[in-house]
Amino acid sequence: MQVPVRNIRNQQCKRKIRSDIILIGVISFLIVCGLVIIASAGIARSMLIYEEPYYFFTHQLMYGFLPGIVVWFGFQGIDYHRWKKLSFPLILLAIFLLAIVLFPGIGISLKGAQRWINLGGMSFQPTELCKLALIIYLSAWLSSHQGNNESLKGFLGFIFILGVIGFLIMLQPDMGTMGITAIIACSIYFLSGARIFYFFVLGVLGSIALWILILIAPYRMERITVFLNPSTGTQDQSYQINQALIAIGSGGVTGLGLGHGRQKFHYLPEPVGDSIFAIVGEETGLIGASFLVILFFILAWRGFVISSKAPDCFGRLLAVGITTWFVFQALINISAISGIIPLTGIPLPFISYGGSALIFAMAGTGILVNISKQLVEKKR
């Protein structure tokens, strides 16, 4: 008696139809923690600039969280396979926005960097869209050309797209984001089956590019010098990391209490931005900071599990790219503000202030949740 093919497939595997509850819970915790910390960390700066204590909190709530929630649930309901068809228009849009942000009158210049576009009174950072668009594009391209990923042609194509985006990002300039973008791209390229030799070549090319960038902008070498020997730097050069370490150290095990931190009162630069983890350490102590780190570890665990069980190559690459984005960006931010690596200026995902960053982060996790709905698990 012949067994129907469909029955055989049903015996070999079963398809999940529920979302990853652990992943959704972790993302929800991170978003809520971000809003709470911004409300506390931004009080002094809000009063100084806007004469109201909770400007940063309300702005993040209205222009980050609320539209982000809509995007998050919306993207959870969109079959992730549809993004494959939109990958090329998305990467073209991202490159276009990265280019026009450099034009005077369109891009907003702040502290020597031109990274924002003003849209109807709201600032928008094209690099946040670029990260997601690059993940989708590389996942679609590499999954469609699996036989060519080990070839020189595939490697040159990968170098070209990464080079174009990297060049535009460095014109802003934003070396930290460029580093994160390169890590994301390389993680997707590695999982697609690229030859190890190509990563050796990428390492050599990256080292040469880094050296050239340091020669062009000496302040980058000053950051490295101050990191290696803080006593050799001027007060301005070592100020942020010193204040961050004071904040983390003064928090002790249990912290000074939420809202009772002192470094946010005009001592620590960017208390709601890339320095926000120092405020977490000061006000919630080792316990609160460790809890935040554990949340990112759980995010990594669930993201890589989803990638390993995705039903196709596109889903696997997409999941690993999105997971790498959040986990490595968090790792670099926390390491930098803790004095483990030189300062980079990279924000902490879901926690640091920034409406466009939160919206695109929630968009990425929405796609990840949708992949989790379609996992294929083999029966034992």
Image: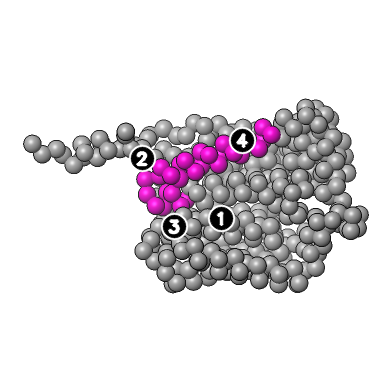
Q: Which SS type dominates the magenta stretch?
A: helix
The earlier-in-sequence mark between 1 and 3 is 1
Query: What number is the disc on residue 192?
Result: 3
Q: Is residue 239 left or right of residue 36?
A: right
The earlier-in-sequence mark between 2 and 1 is 1
Q: Are marks 4 and 3 in contact (CB under 8 Å)?
A: no
Residue density around tag 1, few if under 14, some if 14–19, many if 20 or more, within 10 Å: many
Q: Nearer the viewer, mark 3 or mark 2?
A: 3
The amino acid pointed to by label 3 is Ser
The amino acid pointed to by label 4 is Leu
Q: Is residue 222 left or right of residue 210?
A: right
Q: Which residues are magenta?
A: 290-318
The earlier-in-sequence mark between 3 and 2 is 3
The Cα–Cα distance between marks 1 and 3, rounded to whole angstroms, is: 13 Å
Q: Residue at x 85, y 41 (%)?
A: 246
Picture quadrant where residue 84 is located: bottom left
In the foreground, 112 or 228: 228
Residue picked out by circle 4 = 295
